[in-house]
Image: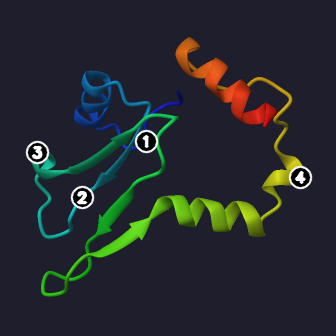
Amino acid sequence: MGTRVGGLPRAGLHCQARGHDYVVVVSRGSRRDPLRLEIYGFTVRDPLPVVSVPLRDEEPDIALDLGLVFLRTYQTGPYRKVIRYDLPPEHPLASEHASWARRILEE
């Protein structure tokens, strides 16, 4: 796991308490209260979440499917050609996830 962006200790605590590897944090411009963050945590095995993206106060949130965004970016970008899946990851996976990842890559 890499370094968290933004220095949000609450997001890190959220991940640790729930066993999450990654976190998406949404902070609404109209509510700059650090205690009112929307935190979406997930593990490396979970599908990427759908998060609510705030627009203007009078407009409803939009749903952003991070899994679809990732898939589209991967399919249209150079990633499958430049990522070395035969090498260990830069940030090693926890042992319980490493064997799972090896099985996925072998398929």
Q: Is residue 103 above or below residue 61?
A: above
Q: Secondary structure at mark 4?
A: helix
Residue at far bottom of view: 58
Task: Tell whether label 1 touches label 2 (CB within 8 Å).
Answer: no
Q: Where residue 27 sits in the image (x, y, percent)?
A: 24, 58
Distance CA(mark 1)–CA(mark 4): 27 Å
Q: Amino acid at mark 1?
A: Val
Q: If the image is split into quadrants, where does the C terminus sit?
A: top right
**Residue drawn at point x = 86 percent, y = 30 percent:** 86
Residue at far front of view: 107
Sequence-earlier tag: 1 or 4: 1
> Nearer the viewer's eye, disc 1 or disc 4?
4
Question: Dot 1, crowdedness within 10 Å: few (<14), some or many (≥20)?
Answer: few
Q: Where residue 50 sits in the image (x, y, percent)?
A: 38, 61
* Residue, disc 4: 81
Question: Dot 2, crowdedness within 10 Å: few (<14), some or many (≥20)?
Answer: some
* Residue, disc 1: 5
Distance CA(mark 4)–CA(mark 2): 35 Å
* Residue, disc 3: 35
Task: Tell whether label 2 touches label 4 (CB within 8 Å).
Answer: no
Distance CA(mark 4)–CA(mark 3): 42 Å
* Quarter location, residue 76: bottom right
* Residue, disc 2: 27
Distance CA(mark 2)–CA(mark 1): 13 Å
Sequence-earlier tag: 4 or 2: 2
Q: Secondary structure at mark 2?
A: loop
**Residue drawn at point x = 29 percent, y = 38 percent:** 8
Distance CA(mark 2)–CA(mark 3): 10 Å
